[in-house]
Image (spheres, rainbow, N blue to C red):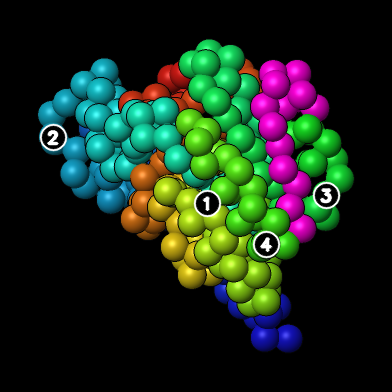
Amino acid sequence: MAQSIISEIQNMRGMLEEQLATLTWGDTQRREPGRAKIFRVMLDAGFSPSLSRRLLDELPAGRGEEQSLKWARAELAGNLHTVAGDEMIDRGGAYALIGPTGVGKTTPIAKLMSIYATKYGKEIGVITNDTYRIAATEQIKRVAQIIGVPVRICRNTSEIKAAVEEFSNRDLVLVDTSGRSQRNARQLAELKQTLEAVQPHETHLVLSMTTQPETMLEIVQNFSSCAFDRVVLTKVDEVVKVGIVLDVLARIPKELSFIATGQEVPRDIEIADSSRLASLILGEEAV
């Protein structure tokens, strides 16, 4: 009963926000066409009405459409926190990917493994403890066999420690962890034990763009107990409105490291770039 009331209130709030946005846009269109253009672009991109209005309030007056778009692109890029470059290549060491089931952790591992081994000639080792999903393990093994990368499938922390020791002389070790529910305290505790066994240089939380913003925030909050360092966005190609995630990203005090834009290995992964993301959000570039 309580949940249905909350859901109804949220629906009403969304309807009111949309109506206010429409009224604001109509008034703005008459007075300042350039500002109205930006407002419509942001709404079409999936921005919430409140975020759209907040950005519009900062737009300098008297700018035309082209200047306004240029300003909006720069403003968005400045609010998106991304890594300075490919830190994995520069630093080496062990890197773990964590996140809920179904966000797409394994495919980025396969892509990065392929790129670093074939393009950069790095010696890679892969560790996975995702023994629940046979398809995920088989994907890793299949790609690794093609490019000659050793894979260790570990069922407990003792095996993980042994694998880490075995790969200690490798340039880069990629760790694919089992998916864990953000609402399951026991599973999160198990994940922390896995990370303690690995002792990674960095831990990257994988988030799917197809996840609802409220759920994404819950994932970030609950996985914070695992002390993740960076964020990876997957399934960017599967959403119509990229801007819908901006409200979430603005509240995450972590840098984006990679974005995954499809299923092709190793092609569909990019180092996160704020200018590129801003252009994607505004619909100026395609995935």
Residue placed under numbered mark 1 in the picture = 205
Magenta-colored span: 142-155
Cβ–Cβ under 8 Å for marks 4 and 3: no
State which tag comes first along the sequence, 4 or 1. 4
Task: Please report whichever mark, 4 or 3, sits nearer to the chain's N-terminal start.
Answer: 3
Q: Secondary structure at mark 2?
A: loop
- Judging depth in this view, the residue of 229 and 10 nearest the camera is 229
Q: Give yes or no for contact between labels 3 and 1 (Cβ–Cβ under 8 Å).
A: no
Residue 134 picture location, percent across and down: 86, 45
At label 2, counting other C-alpha atoms closer than 10 Å, the crowd grade (few under 14, some 14-19, many 20 or more) is few
Q: Which numbered disc flags the more N-terminal residue, 4 or 2?
A: 2
x and y, in percent, of residue 57 in the image = 21, 47
Tell me the residue at 66%/63% (across/down): 157
Dividing the picture into quarters, in which one does residue 58 lie?
A: top left
Q: Which mark is residue 61?
A: 2
Q: Of discs 3 and 2, which sits in the foreground? A: 3
Given the image, on which type of amino acid does mark 3 rest? Arg
Q: Position of residue 18 (x, y in %)?
A: 49, 53
Tell me which numbered mark, 3 or 1, is placed earlier along the sequence. Answer: 3
Residue that mark 4 sits on: 158
Q: Is residue 148 visible?
A: yes
With 71 as the anchor, is 222 left or right in this view?
A: right
